[in-house]
Image (tube, grey):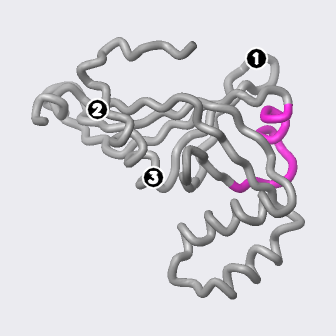
Amino acid sequence: MFREMRRNKQELSQEEAVSILSEATSGVLALAGDEGYPYAVPLSHVYANGKLYFHSARTGHKLDAIRACEKASFCVIQQDQVVPEKYTTYFRSAIAFGRIRVLEGEEAWNALEKLAGRFSPTISPEERHAAIERSFSSCCALELTVEHLTGKEAKELACKA
């Protein structure tokens, strides 16, 4: 169902792709938008157990797109070093493909806790809980179940391995 990588010598292992996805703090979520136009939006995320979690407002283009089509991809770039004299970049990236859904109730709360724990680790659990409670009615949590994950790096980096 998913294409094989054309430049497979640059393909990273699943472990390396998961590492890139886990370490990155943001990426770009791509959805099928209005009238067939792609809709790509940068988002903070947390990765856990084969799933990506995001937060969002309760309304807007992103939510409309998700409700219309659950298929999505999420791309993160770990490294992007411009090398002007070689007309290239030395990059490492990962792309996840899967199905995204809006979470409700306890599932939404748990996703927001994961996000808060990742991005505010020095804040006490009680303070994070209070912050989630204050915004819970006005925000939305999303979960992308990863069905296919690839990682790729510049050929110059692959040669150094």
Q: Which image quadrant is residue 92 in?
A: top left
Q: Which mark identifies residue 36?
A: 1
Q: Which residues are magenta?
A: 55-67
Residue for point 52% across, 45% down: 27
Q: CA distance from mark 2 to mark 3?
A: 16 Å
Amino acid on which the number 3 mark rests in the picture: Ser
Residue 57 locus on image (x, y percent): 80, 54
- Where is residue 86? Give x, y as percent: 15, 26
Q: Which mark is residue 153?
A: 2
Q: Secondary structure at mark 3?
A: helix
Q: Secondary structure at mark 1?
A: helix
Task: Mark 2 or mark 3: name the one nearer the start of the chain.
Answer: 3
Q: Earlier in the sequence, mark 1 or mark 3?
A: 3
Tell me which amino acid carries mark 2.
Glu
Above or below, comparing residue 147 to residue 81 in the picture:
above
Q: Whole-percent x and y of residue 132? A: 76, 74
Whichever of callouts 2 and 1 sits on the residue coming sooner in the sequence is 1
Q: Amino acid at mark 1?
A: Gly
